[in-house]
Amino acid sequence: MIKVLLSGCCGKMGNAIINLVEECDDIEIIAGVDAIERPLSFPVFKSFTEVTMAPDVIIDFSNVEALEKLLEFAVAKRVPALIATTGFNDEQISKIKSASNTVPVFFTANMSLGVNVLCSLAKRAATILGSDFDIEIVERHHNRKLDAPSGTAIMLANAVNSVFEDTYSYEYDRHSKRRMRPKNEIGIHSVRGGTIVGEHEIIFAGHEEVITLSHSAQSKGVFASGAIAAARFLYGAKPGLYDMNDIIGKE
């Protein structure tokens, strides 16, 4: 039985993880960490410093402020960590990478298998189409999402940009510039409204033709399923930095 410490257990993604784990016979949540107090079927602590249990894996869907204590706990206790929170700055990402030298760390902007397949398709399309097509990314999320653009939009842009050896710049605010669109940029646009779970669209606009690749999440369950698969992957893994490509490669 894989024992999970769930960070962000009182949030919407935490609830989705709890519901899915109830259907699993090889995983159990032994404790949670969350600043919000809410009665659950397992103990909930306000900080990692208060946790007394010995988990096998940490699943984190919390917020950027929790990262430092999470990594300290993971490294000190030698516990693999799945970090699915978004909005980290470069310094925080550097700390995540540093922790992966000591413990297995699964770090991704999106836990959906479908989104990660979309990422691979976008790279393939960019390789074939080359610089003759302009590239725009549109992401849509619910009105309570804090960061913009989404971590997934950045992940998709980075994947496409890698095809061009990271020579493209990202444009987030085109309305403030009066100029023609340069070839070597990727436009990234954010929409926030209602209860949209998550939608991502990559537009390749060429001469008299447009190719669109898209993914739409219908519920948070798709991210919960990916998290459970990642937790199973991390259990017994060696120290290192992993992402969904490691899961896809094992399918």
Image (tube, rainbow, N blue to C red):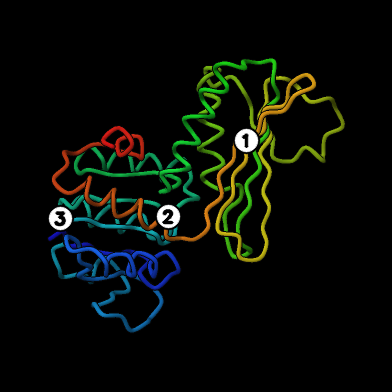
Seen at 78% across and 37% down, the residue is 174
Q: Residue furthest right?
A: 178
Where residue 179 sits: x, y (%)? Answer: 85, 27
Where residue 249 sits: x, y (%)? Answer: 30, 32
The answer to which of marks 3 and 2 sits earlier in the sequence is 3
Classify 244 as above or below 163.
Answer: below
The residue that label 3 is drawn on is 77
Q: Are marks 1 and 2 in contact (CB under 8 Å)?
A: no
The residue that label 1 is drawn on is 202
The residue that label 2 is drawn on is 222
Residue type beneath disc 3: Lys
User: Circle 3 sits in a helix, a strand or a loop, which is it?
Assistant: helix
Seen at 39% across and 70% down, the residue is 15
Where residue 175 sits: x, y (%)? Answer: 82, 40
Residue type beneath disc 1: Ile
Q: Quadrant of residue 128?
A: top right
Seen at 26% across and 40% down, the residue is 100
